[in-house]
Image: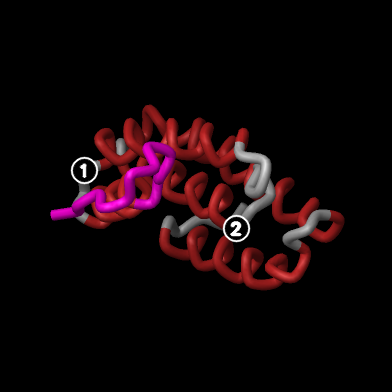
Amino acid sequence: MLVERRPDESNVVPLHMLAEYFVKAGKYKEAEEIARPVCEWMDACSHLGKTSPQAINTRGIITRALWGQGPSRRSEAEALIANIRELVDGMGESKFCIYQKEEVRLNKEMLADLKLEI
């Protein structure tokens, strides 16, 4: 069980971890429902933003959750994969440029896990 010990209500780490666990446990709808607000928070956070590794990872969780929900959600997953690729390509000009190669590698792994060649 995840326990929140910090008084800061903006701590999304437990929710992020729970969403990732739900994907691994096959609870895809629950994972998506938890991860979407986390992603929105990270995108809006001044020290993170859309090109942060954390926000990109959260998009990966959402992608896996969408993919796992079956063919009816796959087009959404593919659109999110394209969005992730654009964000990673744009990392070279952000404060997170040092993580770009690692994000490229992680996204290739995600595509392999989903058995995709996009």
Residue at coordinates 51% horizontally, 45% vertically from top-left? 59
Residue at coordinates 52% horizontally, 35% vertically from top-left? 41
For the record, the magenta segment spans 1-13
User: Which element carries disc 2, helix, strand or loop?
Assistant: helix
Q: Nearer the viewer, residue 50 or 101?
A: 50
Mark 1 vs mark 2: in front: 2
Q: Please indicate whether residue 72 sits to the left or right of residue 89 in the image.
A: left
Q: Are marks 1 and 2 in contact (CB under 8 Å)?
A: no
Q: Residue furthest left?
A: 1
Q: Is residue 115 above or below residue 33?
A: below
Residue, disc 2 = 53
Question: What x and y, as percent, mark residue 34?
Answer: 33, 36
Question: What x and y, as percent, mark residue 58?
Answer: 48, 48
Q: Amino acid at mark 2?
A: Pro
Q: Please indicate whether residue 107 sits to the left or right of residue 96 in the image.
A: left
Mark 1, other Cα within 10 Å: few <14 / some 14–19 / many ≥20? some
Residue 98, by quadrant, is bottom right
Residue, disc 1 = 27
Residue at coordinates 70% horizontally, 71% vertically from top-left? 101
Q: How many numbered marks have been drawn onto this rendered protein structure?
A: 2
Question: What x and y, as percent, mark residue 113?
Answer: 42, 62
Q: Name the disc covering residue 4, or none.
A: none
Earlier-in-chain disc, 1 versus 2: 1
- Most prominent secondary structure in the magenta stretch? loop
Distance between the alpha carbons at the discs numbered 1 and 2:
24 Å
Q: Amino acid at mark 1?
A: Lys
Residue at coordinates 43% horizontally, 33% vertically from top-left? 36
Q: Nearer the viewer, residue 33 or 14?
A: 14
Q: How is the image coloured?
A: secondary structure
Q: Please indicate whether residue 60 sits to the left or right of residue 16 in the image.
A: right
